Amino acid sequence: MLIHRAVYEEEHSLFRDAVRGFIKAEVLPHFTAWEEAGMVERRFWQRAGEAGILCPQIADSHGGAGGNFKHNAVVIEEFAYAGLAGPLSDLTVHSDVGASYIEDLGNEEQKQHWLPRLASGETVCAVAMTEPGTGSDLQAVRTRATPTEAGFRISGNKTFVSNGQHCDLVIVVARTSDAPGAKSISLILVEAERAGFNRGRKLDKLGQLSADTSELFLEDIEVPRGNLLGREGAGFASLMQQLPQERLAIALTSMAAAQRAFDITVDYVRNRKAFGQAIGDFQNTRYKLADLKTELSVGWAFVDQCLDKHVRRQLDSTQASIAKLWCSEMQGRLVDQCLQFFGGYGFMREYEICRLYADARVQRIYGGTSEIMRELISRSLAA
Ligand SMILES: Cc1cc2nc3c(=O)[nH]c(=O)nc-3n(C[C@H](O)[C@H](O)[C@H](O)COP(=O)(O)OP(=O)(O)OC[C@H]3O[C@@H](n4cnc5c(N)ncnc54)[C@H](O)[C@@H]3O)c2cc1C
């Protein structure tokens, strides 16, 4: 199980109990139905808002709980450890990414308008960077936000958008001028009720089946100038500033989900017998599990250090990339080895390890692939 760690204080432990209670009462009873439907029900968002688990880092003056990112980390760990990767991926984009963009980059009017709605679950937020033609290379986005007298006219196609079906508000990455590369990229708030906003397919995925990852089609959407988030042309720099938090969230998810896979595997090998003994007694099993336990211990120590630094605003892009790269790669190795200990049962969807294996795969892809993490880390070598 998730053990108490020194990075957390008493208030986080109390919050953890509340999150566990919410998962037990409001998520687990519906989870299978949500996986079958390919998305959570809307009431998940309302209940999560009522329970205070959406955007817990948002200041109370903006309708939040006035916590810090350690509260977000508690939500992440509890959902990941409960094997709820789909709802967690929805929550991460809403709370840890979208709400933080508005809190850090928004003007007072935008914060007063949107943050209370995000914290209550009245508004579900999405972030649309990726396009069919570009993902890793964000500077190549083609979505246009052409300046008009009143604001911007937005056209383009986005894909792989988490919360794509539920979202009411999308932070769209678009080009606001013809300047090359990063200099023309801006972030724009787009309300889903605007004319020209069209939801495409809910995409059929390998894992995270209850997350409504979707295409979005933006056709000549008119938004007022007040919807610009941050400075015009500074969108790329803003993304670079915000991405470490998203990467830390993914690293924490990897750690807690890997811990879950490890714990259920230890239970399984104690009970499963072969050749007259528990498979957990074979030296091969014991040594491999000892290696995995070692990786988990080292990983928790590093991710806790990063979490502590992040709350003190000292986590830099290199460290966040290291955390995302190592924790997600470790999770991939660990779930593969754990599934092996389940033999053929590990390949059956009715076994939790099968879902943990499928859900883990995307951790090395979204939020910046492992290759992009290596690229970013390698840039720090030049200094
Ligand atoms: C379930 C899911 C949810 C997602 N949610 C969102 C979301 O909410 N919002 C959003 O905007 N996006 C989202 N994404 C998109 C995700 O961030 C991208 O898939 C990811 O950034 C990779 O982009 P790509 O898929 O276009 O791959 P590509 O960029 O085409 O990369 C393909 C391969 O080439 C490699 N590669 C690319 N560039 C380099 C390089 N310079 N050096 C070495 N190798 C390289 C990559 O590492 C990868 O292995 C989501 C994706 C998934 C699968």
Image: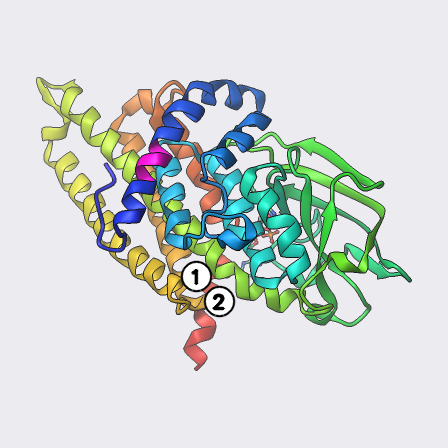
The stretch of residues the image draws in magenta is 16-20
Image-based side of 7 in relation to 28, left or right: left
Near mark 2 (Cα within 10 A), the count class, few <14, some 14-19 or many ≥20, is: some
Q: Residue shown at 45%/34% (left/top)?
A: 51
In the image, residue 155 sits, relative to residue 86, either above or below, namely: below
Q: Quote the CA–CA distance across marks 2 and 1.
A: 7 Å
Marking on residue 321: 1
Which of marks 1 and 2 precedes in the sequence? 1
Residue type at mark 2: give it. Leu
Residue type at mark 1: give it. Ser
Near mark 1 (Cα within 10 A), the count class, few <14, some 14-19 or many ≥20, is: many
Q: Which residue is labeled 2 in the image? A: 376
User: Coloring scheme of the render?
Assistant: rainbow
Q: Quadrant of residue 229?
A: bottom right
In the image, residue 30 sits, relative to residue 151, either above or below, namely: above
Q: Are marks 2 and 1 in contact (CB under 8 Å)?
A: yes
* Residue 128 in sight from this viewpoint: no
Name the residue furthest front.
61
Image-based side of 118 in relation to 187, left or right: left
Q: Quadrant of residue 382?
A: bottom left
Dividing the image into 4 quarters, which one contains the C terminus?
bottom left
* Residue 48 in sight from this viewpoint: yes
Image-based side of 352 in relation to 215, left or right: left
